[in-house]
Image (cartoon, rainbow, N blue to C red):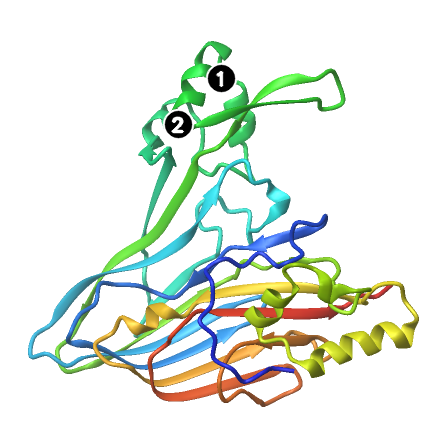
Amino acid sequence: MVKQTVLVLLAGLMPWCAQANDTSAALETGGLRFKHDADIEMRAEDLFISEKQVRIVYKFFNRSAGDKTIMIAFPMPDIVGKEGDEDIGIPTDDPENIFDFHVVVDGKAVSPHLEQTALANGVDQSARLRKLGIPLMPIRGPAGELLDRVPKSNWPELVKLGVGAIETYGTGGPMQDHLVPTWTLRSAYTWTQTFPAGREITFEQTYRPSVGGSVQTIIGADKWRDYPDARGFLAAYCVDDDLIRTIERARATRQLPYPPFSERSIAYVLSTGANWAAPIGEFHLTVDKGEATNLVSFCAEGVKKTGPTRFEVRHTNFTPSGDLKIVIFVPNQN
């Protein structure tokens, strides 16, 4: 069910029906990044993506006559306060390593440094928040509760700085004003890496992806093609007519008033692979849809089904022209 088409993709991932209830947006992640270097080439990239894990194995080669030491980074997606825990697919509860990120170089684990900054109105407010005893992660943790306990005499300044916003709501009692986080957490893991002259080294990066989605797809619903974002959704994931007919047929067979599939979505920043000294020598992509009964769609050329749940793409001298968006349709049990 994968249409073999190349598409330059938009950066956002929120599904076209993601403003309905019971939906979440995926945070866009990718691979390792470092400044373009004319002597460092990526000889191979082996990329595996599933709902449970993203794994990338790189083979780099320093073709210069001398060793090179370069800063490597794994930037994590921005986490924005006030967006709500239920609206974002965050894979773990660890406030620092939310993606369970790990990296190994030539078989040895690397201990990268985590850099975190709390930005409000474009200004670093990390020191202010730490002084107040408030963690920098604005959601999925105690930051909101602790910010709300700050003396109300300090609220006007924090609102002016963009650190918080006043919202009025009740939690089983009378309506009250609350100060909620509005800053953006920007994080990245960094370390310095030496690339020996004239030698190949291997990186293996693993993390858990952010998975968004919806409890029910609109594809196959009554008059679903009339939805304003339907065409864009089909194009963004290269959803083909065979997949659409499969969903519509499942609804008709079960005589249901709605399509019996939920959606899960993953976004991967593939375009950073264009930053090396030359095209990626050997590129291998594997997408695993999880269960044989699931349906999957994404945009790529030369897709081959290699197993009950796996689809693979191979290219030589590959230069990515866009990023990767994957949607998995999961049969509902009811």
Seen at 44% across and 33% down, the residue is: 135
Q: Quadrant of residue 333?
A: bottom right
Residue 86: x, y in percent? 64, 45
Seen at 41% across and 62% down, the residue is: 102
Image quarter where the C terminus lies is: bottom right
Q: What residue type is labelled 1?
A: Val
Q: Name the residue under label 1.
A: 150
Towards the viewer: 119 or 20: 20
For mark 1, give the secondary structure: loop
Give the farthest residue toward the top.
153
Label of residue 301 in the image:
none
Towards the viewer: 225 or 40: 225
For mark 2, give the secondary structure: helix
Q: Mark 2 points at which residue?
A: 129
Going from the N terminus, do you reach mark 2 or mark 1 first?
A: 2
* 255 relative to 155 in the view: left or right: right
Count of picture labels:
2
